[in-house]
Image (cartoon, rainbow, N blue to C red):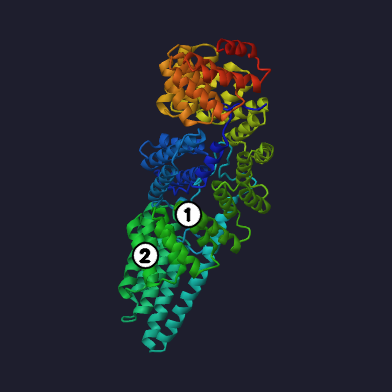
């Protein structure tokens, strides 16, 4: 069964939400809160789960968790702030789903604001910060991974028929790609640490050759540093600090290079304690001690890039974002060829919204380390935020050239190609992702959305069905399947899927509208009216349910009820074609022809190629006594469609009324000559006879 114009869920709305996920970024959540270790850990775990749900665009689940945190502690300001962030993201996605005209810049700014706020909160977190920022636990370095922009940028990438970034139980695409980035960073960090260790040993050997006293000092310092590091690895801050203090006291005077290295070793070790502990007091003290040693290292060698790099990470742990950025920038200035410094600077710039700066840093990283795929991937995310779509695609392709099985990069390429209306290319890249991970529900759902946008609803049905079979039985996927079933005319199935979507998200206005539309297509007017009303209650500015409900009232001759709905819609979207066309109809039936003309004329201006609304306008002009305007309207219709016999007939009659007998005779005789079997031929001939 083919849907009429007002009933179609436009593929444009489906495609629009692809932009949302494709632009969404990640939230860095704070893991602190509560009065004891268990409460702290429980809150950290909860916030980590919130982050997961936000990345999956499962906003209702994230909101539920945050509400639970606020019930437990109403004074949890960070949870309250995150609640507002998630609500804003959900509203943005719902506006896209509703097919509202939303400026992409507005969405990008909302997502950027969410990232910035989350980053501020995350600066005080421990394990949650490490997980969100992709810290390599093996090296204990805060070289957090990709500056992910997924909530696609979201966001996505999901909406009327599109798919969210949501790992299923059978696949862990985002997690796997995150691990890959961490592995790449950890590998490079190991290489750098090995180089630094070799330099330290060489320095110590040279110092030991000077004299026995220096050699004795070196041995004492190394012994105490080793003891302190061993204590730190076991989590004993006090023992570690005591050993390090003894080592600091034994450092030989005047040997700045050696002393700098040892201060950095001690600072690194204390930073590791701070990163691992769940005790807020120990964390604070360890960070303070690490900062003390880092400052000593810089006093010994003010040109040490490594010292600035380490102090930047310490400031990160203390939540001092500005100082952390300044030190990192100085590390890059002192050692511009250390691509890990440059990469981390790009990540920070990205999170602060300095996308131009991030682009420069990531481009530099790709030149310094052409086999470091996270830099190419993050450059792609940055170019996308800058609106440089082609450059973003090439950056993501650079990542796939290095890492052939980079699933997420293929998905990002596919999303961007969708925005360029290159649906064939988009589908090919989703297929590449699925060749690597056949059960990746991200790719399945988004490829289904691409097929839906392409008008291939059978393929869309197939891949949405696969996503559902793989456990993606969420509200959005059921909603997407409902829209496809409606397009295929499978109204009964559409009703079932729409009902499941609403059960999952009872306050989602788009899901409610779709449930109402499915009810209407199944001739279940009670379901349609009820669900349209619920959609309006959920979002009074959502125009689509008002239009459909108004039309149902209009068809039932409940003109005042219809007028109320159309007028309410008109206050939201004054240039909406369907709203104005239907307002013209209602006012015409109420014999208020002046207003009927006003709204039909506005509708024509929005869709000049629509013959039906032009006919409505011509009729309204005639009823309003504006015969010349009416004749002009019919002349335009005949010019657009020479086979519109009724328009010719009405034009001939208007010419007679206007006293244009010559014009009337020409139009009517041409009508009979061209369409001799016209149903009103007898009347046409009678009119012609009156013109003799």
Instruction: Nearest to the eye among marks 2 and 1: give it.
Output: 1
Q: Quadrant of residue 599?
A: top left
Quadrant of the frame with the N terminus: top right
Q: Which residue is mark 1?
A: 388
Q: Residue at x 52, y 11 (%)?
A: 557
Q: List x then y, in percent, for residue 170.
A: 65, 46
Residue 406 is marked as none
Residue 189 visible from this viewpoint: no
Taking 68 as reference, is 533 above or below it? above
Q: List x then y, in percent, for residue 664.
A: 54, 18
Q: List x then y, in percent, for residue 239.
A: 40, 64
Q: Residues within 10 Å of mark 1 (few under 14, many from 20)?
A: few
Q: Residue at x 46, y 75 (%)?
A: 196
Quadrant of the frame with the C terminus: top right
Q: Residues within 10 Å of mark 2 (few under 14, many from 20)?
A: many
Q: State the separation of the CA atoms marked 2 and 1.
A: 25 Å
Residue 3 visible from this viewpoint: yes
Classify residue 573 as left or right of residue 640: left
Nearest the viewer among 240 and 347 is 347
Nearest the viewer among 449 and 57 is 449
Q: Which residue is mark 2?
A: 329
Nearest the viewer among 14 and 141 is 14
Q: Secondary structure at mark 1?
A: loop
Q: List x then y, in percent, for residue 647.
A: 56, 21
Total count of labels: 2
Q: Residue at x 60, y 43 (%)?
A: 446
Taking 405 as reference, is 338 above or below it? below
Q: Quadrant of residue 331?
A: bottom left
Classify residue 647 as left or right of residue 114: right
Residue at the limit of the structure toward the front, as seen here: 692
Taking 682 as reference, is 181 above or below it? below
């Amino acid at each position: 069964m083919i849907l009429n114009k007002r009933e179609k869920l436009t593929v444009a709305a489906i495609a629009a939400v692809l932009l949302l996920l494709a632009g969404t970024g990640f939230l860095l959540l704070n893991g602190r809160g509560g009065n004891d270790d268990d409460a702290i850990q429980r809150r950290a775990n909860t916030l980590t789960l919130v982050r997961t749900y936000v990345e999956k665009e499962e906003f209702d689940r994230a909101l539920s968790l945050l509400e639970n945190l606020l019930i437990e502690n109403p004074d949890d300001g960070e949870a309250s702030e995150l609640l507002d962030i998630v609500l804003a993201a959900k509203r943005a996605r719902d506006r896209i789903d509703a097919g509202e005209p939303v400026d992409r810049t507005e969405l990008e700014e909302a997502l950027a604001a969410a990232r910035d706020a989350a980053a501020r909160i995350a600066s005080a977190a421990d394990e949650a910060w490490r997980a969100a920022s992709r810290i390599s636990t093996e090296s204990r370095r805060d070289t957090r991974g990709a500056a992910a922009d997924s909530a696609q940028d979201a966001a996505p990438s999901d909406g009327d028929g599109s798919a969210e970034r949501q790992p299923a139980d059978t696949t862990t695409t985002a997690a796997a790609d995150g691990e890959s980035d961490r592995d790449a960073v950890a590998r490079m960090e190991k290489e750098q640490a090995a180089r630094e260790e070799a330099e330290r040993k060489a320095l110590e050997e040279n110092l030991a050759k000077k004299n026995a006293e220096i050699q004795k000092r070196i041995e004492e310092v190394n012994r105490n540093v080793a003891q302190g590091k061993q204590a730190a690895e076991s989590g004993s801050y006090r023992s570690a600090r005591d050993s390090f203090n003894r080592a600091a006291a034994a450092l030989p005077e005047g040997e700045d290079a050696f002393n700098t290295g040892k201060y950095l070793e001690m600072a690194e070790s204390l930073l590791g304690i701070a990163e691992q502990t769940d005790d807020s007091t120990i964390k604070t003290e360890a960070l303070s001690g690490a900062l003390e040693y880092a400052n000593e290292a810089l006093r010994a060698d003010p040109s040490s890039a490594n010292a600035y790099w380490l102090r930047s990470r310490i400031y990160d742990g203390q939540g001092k974002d500005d100082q952390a950025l300044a030190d990192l920038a100085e590390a890059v200035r002192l050692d511009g060829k250390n691509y890990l410094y440059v990469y981390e600077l790009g990540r920070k710039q990205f999170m602060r919204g300095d996308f131009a700066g991030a682009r420069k840093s990531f481009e530099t990283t790709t030149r310094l380390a052409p086999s470091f795929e996270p830099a190419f991937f993050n450059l792609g995310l940055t170019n996308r935020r800058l609106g440089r779509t082609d450059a973003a695609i090439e950056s993501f392709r650079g990542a796939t050239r290095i890492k052939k099985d980079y699933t997420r990069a293929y998905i990002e390429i596919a999303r961007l190609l969708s925005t360029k209306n290159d649906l064939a290319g988009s589908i090919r890249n989703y297929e590449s992702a699925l060749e690597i991970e056949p059960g990746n529900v991200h790719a399945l759902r988004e490829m289904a959305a691409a097929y839906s946008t392409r008008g291939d609803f059978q393929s869309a049905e197939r891949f949405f069905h696969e996503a559902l079979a793989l456990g993606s039985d969420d509200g959005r996927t059921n909603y997407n399947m409902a829209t496809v079933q409606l397009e295929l005319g499978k109204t009964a199935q559409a009703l079932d899927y729409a009902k499941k979507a609403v059960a999952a998200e009872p306050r989602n206005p788009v899901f409610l509208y779709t449930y109402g539309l499915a009810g209407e297509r199944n001739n279940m007017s009670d379901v349609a009216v009820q669900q349209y009303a619920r959609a309006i209650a959920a979002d009074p500015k959502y125009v689509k349910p008002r239009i459909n409900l108004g039309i149902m009232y209009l068809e039932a001759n409940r003109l005042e009820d219809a007028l109320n709905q159309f007028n309410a819609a008109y206050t939201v979207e004054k240039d909406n074609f369907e709203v104005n066309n239907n307002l013209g109809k209602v006012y015409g039936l109420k014999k208020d022809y002046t207003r009927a003309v006003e709204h039909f004329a506005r509708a024509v201006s929005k869709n000049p190629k629509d013959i039906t609304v032009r006919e409505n306008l011509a009729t309204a002009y005639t009823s309003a006594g504006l015969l010349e305007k009416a004749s002009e309207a019919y002349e335009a219709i005949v010019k657009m469609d020479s086979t519109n016999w009724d328009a010719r007939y009405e034009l001939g009659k208007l010419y007679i009324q206007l006293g244009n007998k010559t014009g009337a005779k020409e139009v009517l005789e041409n009508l009979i000559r061209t369409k001799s079997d016209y149903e009103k031929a007898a009347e046409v001939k009678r009119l012609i006879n009156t013109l003799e």
